[in-house]
Image (cartoon, rainbow, N blue to C red):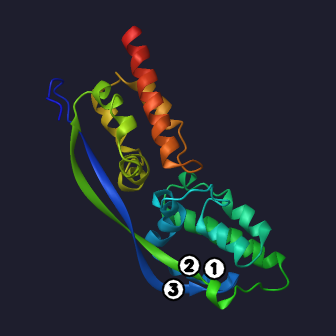
Amino acid sequence: MENNTSGSTPFIVNDCALLAIATGRRAQNLKELRDQLLIIHPGSIYFHFWGNLLHPRFDEPEYSNDFAAWSRHALHDKVLAERLSVVDPNSYGTLDELRQELIEIIEQRLDEREVLAWAQPDQQFEFIRALTVVFRTDLQFFAPEKLASRIGHMSVSSIFYHFIDAKRRNENRLDDFRNWLESFGGRYESLIQCLAMIDPYFTTLTRLREDLARIFSGCLCEADHG
């Protein structure tokens, strides 16, 4: 644990787990998927976009969210799958705005198709809701330079909590790193701008952690030599 030498509020490192909770809601065709999306809890939309990041896997997912994957593999609708797979949740201010985008894409596809595609009974889309459980670690940092030397060793679930989940928790939709860096006035503005350019959706948490470590180290090293 770092001693307080800067007078700033410390960055307290938390870890998390994303629990999957069954909602009991299912869809077997595209109309049912649209109807469930109209009423499903926002936490379910969050899970089906972000949940896979925290699940260990050894392959590269073909589609970036569960709605796209189900459209391709259960409905065999490649056109819809591709349209859904390019939806970036970071482009929407709220989960309800993201929900509306999904509904519009699905309704457009329903208008285009003359025959309604059905999934097999054992391939229904099952809506799962996310519940984030947070764990406090014994790590805290008072200086960004100290955090820079450790960020590459943080757990990927800590990275998820502070860089991805934070944008949903914080009213200003910033990740926890940028919120903390802004407490130092304009001293770390270049680092803040570099972090703002990262889109964590089309990557893995391991690569995201590497990117964060590289950016923290690069920006703070440049500042030291500036």
| Nearer to us in this view, 153 or 226 | 153
* Type of amino acid at the residue the image marks with label 1: Arg
| Spot occupied by residue 69 in the image (x, y as percentages of width and height) | 66, 68
Q: In this view, does 223 lie above or below 154?
A: above
| Nearer to us in this view, 142 or 106 | 142
Q: What is the C-alpha distance between the residues marked 3 and 1?
A: 12 Å
Farthest-out residue, front? 58
Classify mark 3: residues with Cα within 10 Å, few (<14), some (14-19) or many (20+): some
Image side of residue 139 versus residue 176, left or right: left
- Quarter location, residue 71: bottom right
Q: In this view, does 28 lie above or below 193?
A: below
Q: Name the residue under label 3.
A: 25
Q: Mark 2 points at which residue?
A: 38
Of the numbered discs 3 and 2, the one sitting upstream in the chain is 3
Image side of residue 82 versus residue 35, left or right: right
Label 1 secondary element? helix
| Spot occupied by residue 184 in the image (x, y as percentages of width and height) | 28, 27
Asked if the residue at tag 2 contacts the one at tag 1, i.e. Cβ–Cβ closer than 8 Å, the answer is yes
Q: In this view, does 138 lie above or below 189?
A: below
| Spot occupied by residue 47 in the image (x, y as percentages of width and height) | 48, 67
- Quarter location, residue 2: top left
Q: Identify the residue at horizontal 60%, vertical 63% (top origin).
A: 65
Of the numbered discs 3 and 1, the one sitting upstream in the chain is 3
* Type of amino acid at the residue the image marks with label 2: Leu
Classify mark 2: residues with Cα within 10 Å, few (<14), some (14-19) or many (20+): some
Residue 8 shows which numbered tag?
A: none
- Quarter location, residue 77: bottom right
| Spot occupied by residue 136 in the image (x, y as percentages of width and height) | 22, 52
Q: What is the C-alpha distance between the residues marked 1 and 2?
A: 6 Å
Q: Mark 1 points at which residue?
A: 34
* Type of amino acid at the residue the image marks with label 3: Arg
